């Protein structure tokens, strides 16, 4: 019977400690400073995402220009080869 009482007391103490840790951990809310920092980080993330989007658009435009210039270059090389073969 004494063993059961010790185990029961131990279980009650352990349960109380666990409950206290959970309540203390869950009940703390972020401070005003932490909320401000979070809002600042969110706005910075939004700004950076907009910058990334703009840079991706710029990259796509540049890739399109490169493709157009490569096409013109191929035409010039083909014309040059035609002229060379005609001159022979």
Image (cartoon, rainbow, N blue to C red):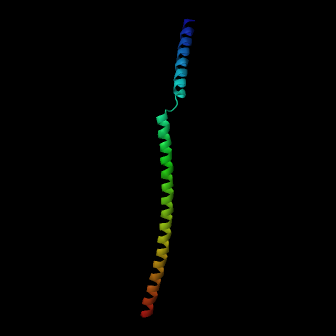
Q: Position of residue 41 (x, y in %)?
A: 48, 44
Quarter of the C terminus within the rendering: bottom left
Residue found 50% across the figure and 52% down from its top = 49
- In this picture, residue 88 sits left or right of residue 39: left
Q: Position of residue 68 (x, y in %)?
A: 49, 74
Residue found 49% across the figure and 34% down from its top = 32
Q: Position of residue 26 (x, y in %)?
A: 54, 28
Count up the numbered dots.
0
From what the image shows, is residue 61 above or below residue 52? Answer: below
User: Between 66 and 44, which is closer to the camera in this rendering?
Assistant: 44
User: Between 12 and 50, which is closer to the camera in this rendering?
Assistant: 50
From what the image shows, is residue 21 above or below residue 42? Answer: above
From what the image shows, is residue 82 above or below residue 32? Answer: below
Residue found 53% across the figure and 21% down from its top = 20
Q: Position of residue 78 (x, y in %)?
A: 47, 83
Residue lying farthest top?
1
Quarter of the N terminus within the rendering: top right
Residue found 47% across the figure and 40% down from its top = 37
């Amino acid at each position: 019977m004494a063993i059961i009482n010790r185990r029961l007391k131990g279980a009650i103490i352990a349960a109380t400690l666990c409950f206290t840790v959970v309540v203390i951990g869950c009940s703390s809310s972020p401070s005003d400073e932490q909320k401000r920092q979070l809002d600042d980080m969110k706005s910075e993330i939004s700004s950076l995402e907009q910058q990334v989007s703009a840079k991706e658009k710029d990259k796509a435009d540049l890739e399109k220009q490169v493709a157009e210039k490569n096409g013109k270059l191929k035409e010039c090389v083909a014309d040059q080869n035609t002229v060379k073969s005609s001159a022979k």
